[in-house]
Amino acid sequence: MTERPASPKMKMRKAPAEERPRIGAPRQIADLMPDIGRAAFRKFGFVQSSIVTRWTDIVGPHYAAVSAPESIRFPVGKKAGGTLQLTVMSGHGPMIQHVLPDIIERVNRFFGYAAVAKIAMRQGQLASVRAERRPPPRNLRPIPVELGDSLRDIGDPELRAVLESLAQGIANSSGLPKVS
């Protein structure tokens, strides 16, 4: 008897390649963003990017609407006693100049130490005006009548508001969540 030669498909197959183990675990993009922003802000004179993002919280909405921080320059080898460069909208310079000591105090309070000793102002246009944050719209479905009547007897207005919000959330849901 003659033996059949092995089929060409069988000869071509290779053993499955071993997968290399991953060295590092996957990371979320949100974890990488502060590092990217930190490098860019340091290049342009900011040690902490939070002074830009939280300027409204630091100086208040009235002054933040007409001014914006540009950079902080520190003396060589120090991280205190720096100069904050502010851009102020045209015509608002005298008003900001009168409140410079308050702004210095608020910025230093924000940092937790005497980071800023003086402020240099420059008149110009602000880069961008942030849109006003509005609360999300309320759900359009009304609270069921049988739940609304029982909530009217509650005397504490804060507790009533929380319970009404919970009842409205339950009414707007599509039923119980499915657990698999």
Image: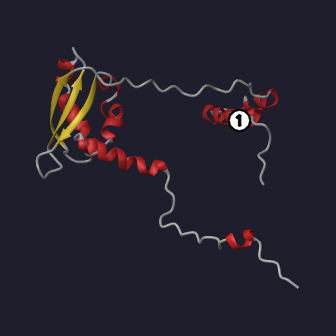
Q: Is residue 18 above or below residue 79?
A: below
Judged from the image, the secondary structure of the residue bearing numbered disc 1 is: helix
Residue placed under numbered mark 1 in the picture: 169
Residues packed near mark 1 inside 10 Å, few (<14), some (14 to 19) or many (20 plus): some
Depth order, front residue of 121/155: 121
Q: Residue furthest left?
A: 76
Q: Give coordinates of residue 89: x percent, y percent.
A: 25, 19
> Which quadrant: the C terminus?
bottom right
Residue found 59% across the figure and 72% down from its top: 18
Q: Is residue 38 left or right of residue 170?
A: left
Q: Give coordinates of residue 124: x percent, y percent.
A: 22, 20
Q: Give coordinates of residue 36: x percent, y percent.
A: 36, 47
* Amino acid marked by disc 1: Gly
Residue found 18% across the figure and 32% down from its top: 101
Depth order, front residue of 119/147: 119
Depth order, front residue of 162/47: 47
Q: Is residue 94 above or below residue 76?
A: above
Q: Residue furthest right?
A: 1
Q: Give coordinates of residue 17: x percent, y percent.
A: 60, 70
Quarter occupied by residue 157: top right
Q: Is residue 100 left or right of residue 62?
A: left
